[in-house]
Structure formats: C-alpha cells, structure tokens
Amino acid sequence: MARRPPTPNARHRAKRDPHAPYPYARRATEGEEEAFDPRLRLTAEFVLSAPSLADTPEDAGREVAFAGRSNAGKSSVLNRITGQRSLARTGRTPGRTQALNFFRAGEDRFLVDLPGYGYAKTDRQLQAEWQAHVEAYLAQRQALVGIVLVMDIRHPFQTFDRQLLRWAGQAALPVLVLLNKADKLGHEAQLEVMRQAEEETAAYPTVTPVLFSALRGQGAVTVLRQLRDWLNLPLPGAGAEEEDEA
C-alpha cells in the first residue's frame, strides 16, 4: 500500500511525542464498566453499502474506519459502542461484510465497517477485490481521521494486521488496536497479551492497544472517548446542547 499523501486533515494526525500520553487512550481499569456513562455511546444509523470507493459518500467531514480479520468481531464492536444489537450484522459465518458499510454518527461524521480479510473459504478472486477496495479507501479517503483495528485476543497481529499498522505509521494515522474477546481469557492471560501488544506497537507512537470485550463492554469507555475525540463529538457534561442517549 502506497504512503498516504498529506491531506487537509493532516493536522488531526500529526506525529506526537512518543512519550506523551495519547488523548483519552488508556488501559482499561477494573471497575471501569461499572462507571460507564450510557451517554458516551454513539448514535449511529446505517446509510449505505459501497462495493467500491466510487460508491462512497462525499469525501468530507470525519470518518473512523473499523478493520480486522474475518470473525475478529468488528460487527459486535460496532453494536457495543452504539448500544444497538443489530446496527451491524453479526453471525457465525466469517466474511459477511463484503463492502464498505457507512454508518452516520452525526453531521458529516461516519463510522465505516470495512470488509474483513483473511477468511480462507472466501473465493480468492473476490477476496483480492475486497482487499483492493479497502486499500484504495485507506490510501485515498481524505475524511479518514482514525482506524479501529479489531483483533481476536487469542490470535493477534496476523500478517495483514502488521501490514495495516506499518501503513498507518507511515501516514501518521492514529490507530486503536482492540484486543477483542478478552472475556475468553483470564485476567493474567489478558495482561500478558497486552504486554506483548505494547511491545509489538512500541515503534508506532500513534497506535494504542486496548483490552476489549464486545460481549461484556470491557474497554468501552476508552474506545468511546477516543472515537468522540477523533470525530470531534462532545463528551457528556461538556456543555453540548444535545447528548447521545443510549
């Protein structure tokens, strides 16, 4: 994937001091879910499914893309952060997302569910076409201000995961790495994977790993605060006239 050229949104993803804390991004702490404020959730609605970059909405405003291997749980993550059980379709069959699905989260604000990658049973030609569309979107979309890279905590940092992180690092594009399905591991095992993830991403100052569970909501506060920052949406209690309701 070619390096993304500077864009009008470059000020939103300038390289930062690698020793400085990333805005709002922090490791989830015990008890975080109990303190969850439902108003943090994003209100979103499905807009369209674009089979190619040419079919996407006008390239304006701000967008956050959700990427990940097939069956990593992207759809479940989207449903969790919006508090909607069926916003994005989920199922036991990997590879269901076959286009770029756009969800409006405010005026000129979108969440974009990208096609999953790496599902062996998918026709190779079709899989190559999906990947080409994803790469074109990531390289050319000017409204893109951040990426949420969803991984199964039991199988993190596969080949395409690392490829996407390298590209994002070159473009100084911020990434949240969600170590999803954390509920599948015990506490100590979670911390060990988190330690390894921090080592894996140490070379990328704009990448932040987060322990996450779409099932239980672990890490949701961290992710929602970061999404609101990227999309320039107010936080609860920030004085906005309108707040998102669960």
Image (spheres, rainbow, N blue to C red):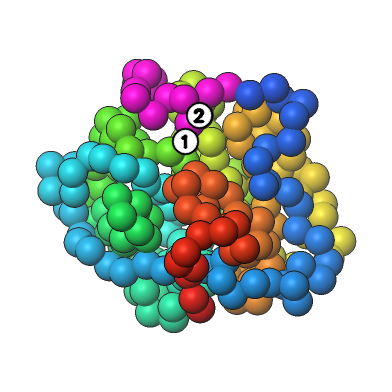
Quadrant of the drawing holding the N terminus: top left
The image shows residue 228 at horizontal and vertical percentages of 52, 53
Q: Which residues are magenta?
A: 3-15
In the rendered structure, does residue 6 fall within the stretch colored magenta?
A: yes
Residue behind mark 2: 13
Nearest to the eye among marks 2 and 1: give it: 2
Callout 1 amino acid: Leu
Callout 2 amino acid: Arg
Going 20% across and 61% down the picture, which residue do you hit?
Answer: 48
Residues 220 and 50: in front is: 220
Is 220 placed above or below 140 here? Answer: below
Going 26% across and 40% down the picture, which residue do you hit?
Answer: 60
Q: What element does badge 2 sit on?
A: helix
Q: Is residue 230 left or right of residue 204?
A: left
Going 23% across and 39% down the picture, which residue do you hit?
Answer: 59
Residues 177 and 244: in front is: 244
Is 220 placed above or below 178 here? Answer: below
Q: What element does badge 1 sit on?
A: helix
Callout 1 crowding tier (Cα within 10 Å): few <14, some 14–19, many ≥20: some
Where, by quadrant of the figure, is residue 46 drawn? bottom left
The image shows residue 231 at horizontal and vertical percentages of 45, 48
Going 35% across and 58% down the picture, which residue do you hit?
Answer: 106
Label located before the other in sequence (2 or 1) = 2
Where, by quadrant of the figure, is residue 153 drawn? bottom right
Residue behind mark 1: 164
